[in-house]
Amino acid sequence: MSEPSATSNDHRTRPSARPWWKDALVYQVYVRSFADSNGDGVGDLAGIRSRLDHIASLGVEAIWLNPCYPSPQHDHGYDVANYFDIHDEYGTLDDFDALLADARDLGIKILMDLVPSHCSIEHRWFIAALASDPNSPERARFYFRDGKGDAGNEPPNNWQSAFGGPAWTRLDTDPTANNGKGGQWYLHTFAREQPDLDHTHADVNQLFDEIFKFWFDRGVEGFRVDAVAGTGKHPDLPDQPPVGPEVGVLDITWMNEYTVFRPEGHDVWRRFRTTIDNYESSHPDRELMMVAEAYAVRRPELVKAFTEPDQFHQMFSFDLMLTPWEKHSIERAMLDPIAILAETGVPPAWTLNNHDIQRIVTRLGRADAHLPEVWTNNNLALSRADVDLALGERRARAMTALIFALPGSLYLYQGEELGLPEVFDIPANRREDPVFERTGGAEIGRDGCRVPMPWTNDASSSYGFSTPRADGTVGEPWLPQPAEWGERSVSEIDDIENSTLHMYRSLGEVRDEFAVSQPLEAQTIDIGPEVVAVRRGELVVVVNPTDQPVQLDLDHPEMAITQPVFASEPAEMHTTGVIPANSTIWFSS
Ligand code: NOJ
């Protein structure tokens, strides 16, 4: 294993007892859409390697790779066919090792995406289950049940899939007559190609032990753990109470008390934590971690339960991601996770974007983005109000400048550093998200935040996303890119003073200088009725979420020793205490 080089990102002045992951800057790579090294229109690991300098330039300490295991890609890798290899479109295990080594040379760690709740219909266990009898051991690793009714024609219960439609799919046939009940049904919380695993089964426990060991041995430092809300189930799988017509198709699953935030899930996380702790105790030079993905916004009791010392090291806070651009909403979204940190010592993993959510530039540019009631826990049923992208980008920059100052780790999603907006102009026949198909097009799904990255203004190489093949051609990118991608590309905005890309790089630097060295705590301070103001040790960060400049009282005791050290709109940064509309300024002594 190579040692970090002199140019590495391993240089932070973090208090020495603090593990790196508690306040790391992490960059999420959606492998399919980051960089395509072989011209087939699909991103791959060698492509990521070729663009590591870009990631390093942001001051990033770790990369989280979305699932890159072999998969038929029905949910783009969240349907895992084999947890111990690399998907062939993305490369090989050798490519993975090479990526990890190059990243390590830059002081960047690799986190994988672990998908425990379900696997793929192409996983060998599911294939074996289909070929076996209804009551066979092969079926016991999943949730196979007979249907209701004499002929078993009705699903075993009324649960709905998170992607729309029933959470059960029936087999056309079964190897035996099954007492006249016909083909059995299997449970899938997500798409029908993602059968749920039963974590009360010893084989499933053992599989995940082996997965952790396999990737830790290769040098991976941790895992983002997928869909932890829905992993445990009530053992009897009872019908969920009826819901009214006002409940949208994508909300029903999340209201199902028999499969969401179940106590049974916590047994799984305790086992995982024991596995990680055991590995770490025999590798004292490693600081391993797992971070939980679940939408527990405004539910501190859930966050605390998931981050008990014997479970997750951290949990994502999606509070600020889903918050309207309004003072009180922003304060609450920030203070809830900070209060948990003060109580438990577990810092949140903040994020403003990911591969499931409309990009923040679009969300904050909506005509109703400032209305408190626009807040929603449903990541897909968002406002349809008109979008002002310039305003959205300005607000997104201000929100980003806030989040970089907060205690905790910070997960960036590829492309947010370019200020990329959501892409809506994707023809129906090019849409790939199973949400689109399963809701009959009623929900457009998540393709719009997954469009391949623009690196250059060269349309003939899909804006630098694809490296041409030997004959000079490139395949169509797997999702179409809009024409404006060229002017939004890395190389174009790198030439623009004060571009969002420059802002992210500067934020990484000031975060290291003024925030990471501070204790893991923060408080809001009252320095005026319009602004959100946060103190973190010597650092004071002020957000103006209004459409008017706000004059601060520089004689206010909280402002006494402070100088501006960073502004989300640098051209307007000055020392008079004016915070420009929709912007953020950092002050320090
Ligand atoms: C959450 C992931 O982020 C999302 O992309 C995926 O579709 C579901 N979990 C199911 O695995």
Image: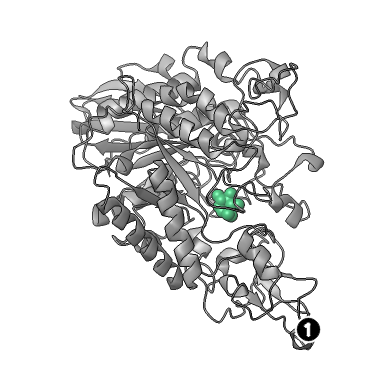
Element on which disc 1 rests = loop
Residue at figure coordinates x 56%, y 29% from the top left: 46
The answer to whether residue 24 is left or right of residue 418 is: left
Q: Is residue 407 visible?
A: no
The answer to whether residue 255 is left or right of residue 274 is: right
Q: Quadrant of the N terminus?
A: top left
Q: Position of residue 120 (x, y in %)?
A: 63, 57
Residue at figure coordinates x 45%, y 72% from the top left: 264
Residue at figure coordinates x 40%, y 67% from the top left: 266
- Residue 538, compared with residue 207, is above or below; it is above
Residue at figure coordinates x 30%, y 38% from the top left: 534
| Picture quadrant where residue 453 is located | top right
- Residue 575, compared with residue 542, is above or below; it is above
Which of 32 and 149 lies nearest the eye of the viewer? 32
Residue at image mark 1: 177
Which of 454 and 471 lies nearest the eye of the viewer? 471
The answer to whether residue 343 is left or right of residue 374 is: left
Tell me: is circle 1 under 8 Å from ligand 1. no
Which of 99 and 301 lies nearest the eye of the viewer? 99
Q: Quadrant of the C terminus?
A: top left
| Amino acid at the residue labelled 1 | Ala
Q: Position of residue 230 (x, y in %)?
A: 53, 64
Q: Is residue 61 visible?
A: yes
